[in-house]
Image (cartoon, rainbow, N blue to C red):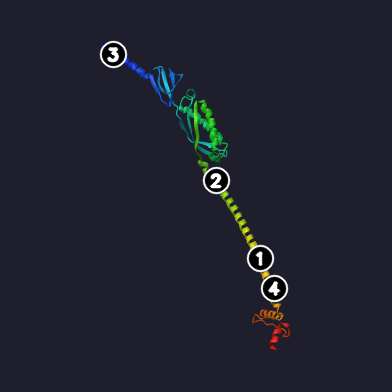
C-alpha cells in the first residue's frame, strides 16, 4: 500500500512538472518563435498563455517595441575636403519577425546592418555638400535621402525604421580654427561693405544738403535784391513826387546830401573853385 502511494505521488509530481514546463506566457510587447528539436517550426506565437511539448519544443521571445540605436560619432569628408564629426541615432522595431530571424536573428546583427547602410548613405550625401549645407541648408533633405535608403535595407531584414536623426554635427579639431577664421574674415568683409555703402550715402546726403543750402541762399539773396530794388524805386518815386512840387528845395536837399558825403572826414583835403555850382549855396549864404 505504501509503495502504491509513493508511485502515485511521484506520478503526480511528474505530471505537475510536465504541466509547468508545458505552459509559458508571451508578454504584450513580445512575439515568440517555436522551435522543434532546435529547428524553427515556422510557427509565430502571439501574446498570451501558450503551450509547448517539453523537451521537444523551445521558445525564443523577441521585443517588438521601438528600439533606439545610439550610434558612435563617425567622421565624414565634405566636398571641400573638410572633416566633420557626425553623431546620429536611429529608432527601429521588428516588423516581420520570421524574416528578421531568417536574416539577422538578433538585435546586434540587425543594428550592424542598419549602421552600415546609414554610414554609406551619409558618406555619399556629405561628400556632395559643404559644411554649411550639411549643418543648415540641406540637413532635412539629407535625412530624407538617408531615411529612404535605410528603409530599403530595413525591409530586407524584417524591421521598420521609425526615425533617423542627426544629433550633432561638429567640425573636426584639425579644421575648426581655419573655419572660424574664414567665418570671421567673411563677416569682416560684409561689415566693410556696409560701412563703405554708409559712407557713400553720407557723402551723397551731405552733398545734397550743401547744394540745397547754396540754392536756398542764392534764392534768398535774389529775392532780397528784388525787394531792395523795388523799395529803392518806390522811395525814389516818393522823393521825386515830393520834391517835384518844389524844385529849388529838392536841389538844395540834394546839395546837402552831397556836402555830407564829401566832408565826412576831418582829414580830407579838397581843392575846388568856389565859383562852381557845387558851392553856390555857400556863396548865396555869404552874400
Cα–Cα gap, marks 4 and 1: 21 Å
Q: Are marks 3 and 2 in contact (CB under 8 Å)?
A: no
Indicate which disc residue 198 carries: none
Q: Are marks 4 and 3 in contact (CB under 8 Å)?
A: no
Q: In the image, 202: left or right of 62?
A: right
Residue 80 picture location, percent across and down: 57, 39
The residue wearing badge 1 is 223
Q: Nearer the viewer, residue 225 or 137?
A: 225
Depth check, mark 4 against mark 3: the one in front is 4
Depth check, mark 1 against mark 2: the one in front is 1
Q: Element under label 1? A: helix
Indicate which disc residue 183 carries: 2
Cα–Cα gap, marks 2 and 4: 80 Å
Residue 57 vertical position relative to residue 189 in the rendered view, above or below: above
Q: In the image, 174: left or right of 10?
A: right
Residue at point 50%, 33% (across, down): 164
The residue wearing badge 4 is 237
Q: Residues within 10 Å of mark 3 (few under 14, many from 20)?
A: few
Amino acid at each position: 500500500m505504501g509503495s502504491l502511494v509513493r508511485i502515485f505521488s511521484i506520478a503526480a509530481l511528474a505530471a505537475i512538472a510536465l504541466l509547468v514546463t508545458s505552459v509559458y506566457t508571451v508578454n504584450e510587447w513580445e512575439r515568440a518563435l517555436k522551435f522543434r528539436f532546435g529547428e524553427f517550426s515556422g510557427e509565430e506565437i502571439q501574446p498570451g498563455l501558450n503551450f509547448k511539448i517539453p523537451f521537444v519544443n523551445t521558445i525564443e521571445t523577441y521585443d517588438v517595441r521601438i528600439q533606439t540605436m545610439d550610434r558612435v560619432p563617425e567622421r565624414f569628408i565634405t566636398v571641400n575636403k573638410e572633416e566633420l564629426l557626425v553623431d546620429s541615432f536611429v529608432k527601429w522595431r521588428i516588423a516581420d519577425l520570421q524574416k528578421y530571424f531568417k536574416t539577422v536573428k538578433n538585435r546586434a546583427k540587425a543594428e550592424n546592418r542598419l549602421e552600415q547602410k546609414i554610414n554609406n548613405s551619409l558618406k555619399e550625401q556629405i561628400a556632395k555638400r559643404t559644411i554649411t549645407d550639411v549643418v543648415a541648408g540641406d540637413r532635412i533633405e539629407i535625412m530624407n535621402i538617408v531615411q529612404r535608403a535605410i528603409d530599403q535595407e530595413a525591409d530586407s531584414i524584417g524591421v521598420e525604421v521609425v526615425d533617423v536623426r542627426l544629433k550633432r554635427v561638429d567640425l573636426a579639431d584639425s579644421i575648426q580654427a581655419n573655419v572660424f577664421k574664414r567665418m570671421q574674415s567673411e563677416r569682416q568683409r560684409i561689415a566693410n561693405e556696409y560701412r563703405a555703402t554708409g559712407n557713400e550715402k553720407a557723402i551723397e546726403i551731405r552733398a545734397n544738403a550743401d547744394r540745397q543750402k547754396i540754392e536756398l541762399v542764392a534764392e534768398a539773396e535774389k529775392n532780397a535784391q528784388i525787394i531792395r530794388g523795388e523799395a529803392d524805386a518806390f522811395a525814389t518815386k516818393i522823393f521825386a513826387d515830393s520834391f517835384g512840387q518844389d524844385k529849388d528845395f529838392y536841389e538844395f536837399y540834394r546839395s546837402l546830401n552831397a556836402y555830407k558825403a564829401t566832408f565826412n572826414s576831418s582829414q580830407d583835403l579838397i581843392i575846388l573853385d568856389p565859383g562852381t555850382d557845387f558851392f553856390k549855396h555857400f556863396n548865396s549864404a555869404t552874400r
